[in-house]
Image (cartoon, coloured by chain):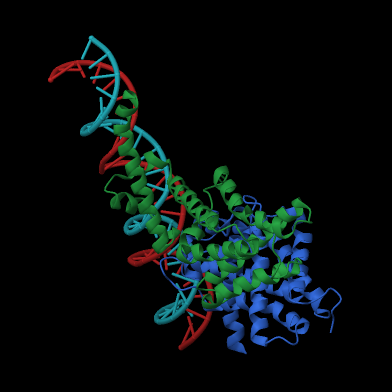
Chain colours: A green, B blue, C cyan, D red
Amino acid sequence: MNIVQEESRRDRKKLQRRTLLVEIARRFIATKGLRSLKVRDVADAAKCSIGSVYNEFGDFDGLILTVNRETVEALTTRLKAVPADDPLRQLHGLADAYLGFASEHANLLRSLFEHRMEDDRPFPEDILAMVMDAFALMHAPLVRLLPDRDPDDVALLSRMMFSAVHGIISLGLEERMVAVPPEMLRERLAQFVDTHLAGLGVSRGDQV
Amino acid sequence: MNIVQEESRRDRKKLQRRTLLVEIARRFIATKGLRSLKVRDVADAAKCSIGSVYNEFGDFDGLILTVNRETVEALTTRLKAVPADDPLRQLHGLADAYLGFASEHANLLRSLFEHRMEDDRPFPEDILAMVMDAFALMHAPLVRLLPDRDPDDVALLSRMMFSAVHGIISLGLEERMVAVPPEMLRERLAQFVDTHLAGLGVSRGDQV
DNA sequence: CTTAAAAATGAACATTGTTCAAGAAGAATC
DNA sequence: GATTCTTCTTGAACAATGTTCATTTTTAAG
């Protein structure tokens, strides 16, 4: 107890600054895009030295990855908050939640999917796993809607469906190449989910 | 005639080197990714000075955008080569051609979609238009398959379908976050197209 | 051949990620 | 509370890389 208490003094301060740095980096990415993130800007904003940023995150990628990690976490939290009572409504809810998150945090999501590691360093396993988990969230409701299908098949279907939704949203929100106008995106996305489900043999009224 | 002939001496040389520079840059991007592209490496490989690269492309973005422009062109050429006799086969052909191109030129395609301009400079209009044109290629066959639908509706449907295909492929080919295993991608993509068409009310046998 | 225009060059500069020796702050021991 | 040991912090210096521009070289015109 004593030890914990005594160590926590320094640790708390350390954690406090770490949090501050991540917060600042995230704000930079969110407002001006990943490319605008600069070590010196972050250090200045946090009123600490450049070295401290390195001390805390190892290198620049470390800081970016920390932000990205928290982005997946936030996304997952939001997706998991979608009610799971009705599978059909849940699927629509997931697509809509993804769209909502992507609209509000476009640059953060882009940072997650577009950031490339320096040289050939491997992408962190844990972030990979988290993204995969998020993408697997369509699995449960799809299993309920397609009880007769091979579960492995449904697993693939769910990831494909999520990938498709991801594609529609990420291109749709890209100001530059408007594949689908943002105003319509919401209803079109719902339509897409319905269409695809219909193709899978699920009619609008189906329920468990 | 004389003027053209005389001017072409210099111009031909200029064009020749421009082509060489683009070729080299493309090879760098294709093999090691956009992040590995360095002005000095390109200049060295072309046995010319750094200044010449700038003289030719204005800035670094200029070189990248030139490569990207040619990437869309190559993609479009490939997509347009898909036979248009049977609309159903054409849709599958387009998806498959996109997958083929993405497999063979993963880094080039990533460069096209992931590259962000310096500061807030606008993305070149012509590249935008070319990408949109490529994405519109699913329109014609879909119109034939859905003759009773509102054309505007079909236009949106086609861009959505292409966006979805893009999402499935780009995440599927991402070694890191394998949403769909690459070996299965081909058949799964075909299945996806079929499923979606079925949802739109097109049965496998439909033809014009 | 002379001269003017265009292009090529690469040293110098600006920005930005990274390192590290020196110093400051904190914890532990007496 | 002084001493010592550990850890953290700092920012100058370095390295990598995009960018500029005065100078030189090349090409075209007269």
Res A107 visible = yes
Along the horizontal axis of the image, is C22 left or right of A186? left
Res B82 visible = no
Residue at the extreme right? B205
Q: Is residue B134 above or below residue A87?
A: below
On the image, the x and y values in percent for residue B99 come to 72, 63
| Residue at 29% over, 44% down | A49
On the image, the x and y values in percent for residue B61 come to 49, 66
User: Dividing the image into 4 quarters, which one contains the N terminus of chain B?
Assistant: bottom right
- Give whichever of B107, A34 is nearer the camera: A34
Along the horizontal axis of the image, is B207 left or right of D18? right
On the image, the x and y values in percent for residue A194 come to 67, 70
> Number of numbered discs present?
0
On the image, the x and y values in percent for residue A175 come to 50, 73
Along the horizontal axis of the image, is A142 left or right of A103? right
| Residue at 68% over, 74% down | B76
- Give whichever of D11, A91 is nearer the camera: A91
Q: Is residue B193 above or below residue B143?
A: above
User: Dividing the image into 4 quarters, which one contains the C terminus of chain B?
Assistant: bottom right
The quarter holding residue A193 reads: bottom right
Residue at the extreme front? A208
Q: Is residue A157 above or below residue B2?
A: above
- Give whichever of A47, A13 is nearer the camera: A13
- Give whichever of D27, A206 is nearer the camera: A206
Q: Is residue B177 above or below residue B165?
A: above
The quarter holding residue B140 reads: bottom right
